Image (cartoon, rainbow, N blue to C red):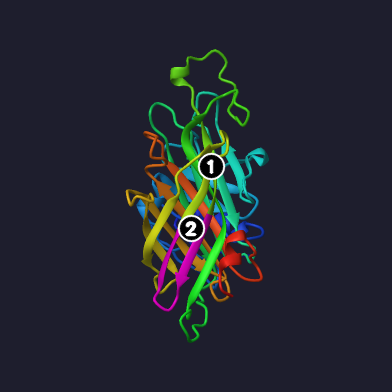
Amino acid sequence: MSRVIWPLAALLAFAACSGNGPAVVDSAGGTGGSTDGGTEISPIPDNLKVNLEAIAYDGTTLQVQIAGLDSTPTLVTFDRAETLDLNGYKAFKMQEDALDRMFVALAKTSDDGSVTAATVSDGGQFNRHYGGGIYSRNGAFTPPVIGSGPGAGQVSYAGDYVGVMNGRVQYGDPTSELLDPGTADPAITPQQSSRVSGAIFLNANFSENLVNGAIYDRVIVDEGFALDDVILVPTTIGSDGTFIGTTEFENQTPNGSYGGIFGGTSANSVAGVVYLTEVESSFDNEQEHGAFVLTKCGPDNTSPACSYVAP
């Protein structure tokens, strides 16, 4: 049972009593810690957390604290939303009533239980939306053994990317989970986040401590609308196995930030989040909060991209 020391009493109680899997937790202060080999939380920068203040997730239950959350408790238990599950990421939702913001969250823990990522966003109301993401590791960072030769320290990761973006799904749409607003004026009704599906590929070099990659085949699932690819600009891997970097479109126009954490034996897994302030070159005012949980290419990962990677 993972136990996390945290200044928020509600988070402490949830993490200590959680069932299987590590809890993802963070607070507005952006600091973290670990106890007796349990869940490690590295400081997550504000440009990735955005409005998110805390998340607790044990693989079954998700609790969220977010600035702008329309609910009385500061840490709110979301409802499971199986119909919104995407690419192996579990979906959760929260809406107090038909005229309150409707939030959708997506979360996943790696198959080896070493890393977890979660992201959440509402669909927008009154010209604003709220969202963010958090990642964590269960246990210490153990990088792979670096051999000799031209490929020394080079490791690839591939898998599915998911995201939630603002301002697309209305009540009555096929994938809507919004409460019925009746005859309320559209000026005061909320929207539901649209889900984004994609593939993600990372190359990490643990000899030079650098990571980069791309998110591609991005699609707004609820509409079938294809989105631009996103480049994960090369950035440094810290001594604790974390990384923070920037994103851009293929024409090198900056459009956001990404970050994550390596975990598992020989950095077998990696989890992270993405915040895009520009979702698509033809869109205005849309923003995307994404997450990824990936396994190293090899026997445990036969994703299509891994077939082109040297063993």
Q: Amino acid at mark 2?
A: Gly
Q: Residues within 10 Å of mark 1 (few under 14, many from 20)?
A: many
Residue 219 numbered tag: 1
Q: CA distance from mark 2 to mark 1?
A: 19 Å
- Most extreme residue toward the left, as rendered? 253
Q: Residues within 10 Å of mark 2 (few under 14, many from 20)?
A: many
Q: Does 135 appear above or below 309? A: above
Q: Earlier in the sequence, mark 2 or mark 1?
A: 1
User: Dot 2 corresponds to which residue?
Assistant: 272
Q: Quadrant of the C terminus?
A: bottom right
How many dots with numbers? 2
Callout 2–callout 1 Cβ contact below 8 Å: no
Report the span colored magenta.
Answer: 200-213
Q: Amino acid at mark 1?
A: Val
Query: Which one is in front, 279 or 241?
Result: 279
Q: Does 164 appear above or below 301? A: above
Image coordinates for residue 265, horizontal then vertical, percent: 58, 75
Image coordinates for residue 220, horizontal then vertical, percent: 53, 39
Q: Is residue 146 magenta?
A: no
Q: Does 97 appear above or below 149? A: above
